[in-house]
Image: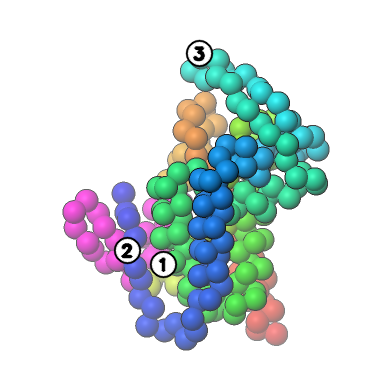
Amino acid sequence: MFIPLGDDNSQRRSTPVVVYAIMAANAYMWFLQLTRGEPFTNALSTVPYEITHHVDLAQTIKLQVQGQVLPLRLYPSPDPISVTIFSAMFMHGSWMHIIGNMVYLGIFGDQIEDYLGHFKFLLFYLLCGIGAALAHVYADPNSVIPSLGASGAIAGVLGAYLALYPRNRVRVMVGRDIIILPAIVVLGFWIVLQVIGQAGAAAGQASGVAYMAHIGGFVAGMALLLIFRRRRTR
């Protein structure tokens, strides 16, 4: 497993103020989650069934998990329900979840913001998050399990980074060693893991990770980069 620690920023020209703002927004939402608890988190998370059926499931649902019946409490969501696609991309499920996401965003997001410009990067990031959420929703449209996290939007950043800077040097921790690898190896390994994970999920191996959101965000990032590139060339 590669744990990224940093990359070569020598050619970056601007301060990544939007990346910092997004990180601050995620931190603030995490604070609200910690202080307001499950009702706040579940209400603003994306529930695929609610999106595809345009209904608010404010009730307790019984889930079959590995032969056990577990209750899942869903709370009233915003109106329209599609708002949760935006709110969920700034929320997280644990300390490790938010720390890991912010590390990836901080390392790889700054150069994409530098390339696109501040406003276009913000638009790019939000569109990647939407693409990731829709990929997750339509991969399992009847799921009632809340989904949350910035991973899908950040996956779009990773896709753009891989397309723009495949040879850029990335410092990674492998075991106890710190080595330097090209981005194509680090991010290529990451997306391969997501595809393998999704294949396992499709085969019924539950993991709690929205692999399809990661794949959808990654693909959205590469596709949107082509659009933004074309506009920039013009």
In the displayed structure, 17 sits above or below 72; it is: below
In the displayed structure, 193 sits above or below 167; it is: above
Residue highlighted by disc 2: 5
Residue at image coords 50%, 84%:
14
Task: Label 3: state its secondary structure.
Answer: loop
Looking at the image, which is closer to me, 159 or 151?
151
Where are the magenta residues, as a range? Answer: 169-192
**Spatial CA span between label 2 and label 3:** 40 Å
Q: Residues within 10 Å of mark 3 (few under 14, many from 20)?
A: few
* Residue 124 seen anywhere in this rendered image of the structure: yes
Q: Residues within 10 Å of mark 1 (few under 14, many from 20)?
A: some
Looking at the image, which is closer to me, 207 or 15?
15
Instruction: Please state which amino acid type lies under the numbered disc 3.
Output: Gly
Check the image and name the residue furthest to the front. Answer: 35
Residue at image coords 34%, 68%:
6
Instruction: Please state which amino acid type lies under the numbered disc 2.
Output: Leu
**Spatial CA span between label 1 and label 3:** 41 Å
Which quarter of the picture shows residue 220?
Answer: bottom right
Residue 197: % across, % down: 46, 39
Residue highlighted by disc 3: 67
Q: Residues within 10 Å of mark 2 (few under 14, many from 20)?
A: some
Instruction: Please state which amino acid type lies under the numbered disc 1.
Output: Ile
Residue highlighted by disc 1: 107
Question: Which numbered disc flags the more N-terminal residue, 1 or 2?
Answer: 2
Residues at discs 1 and 2 in contact (Cβ within 8 Å): yes
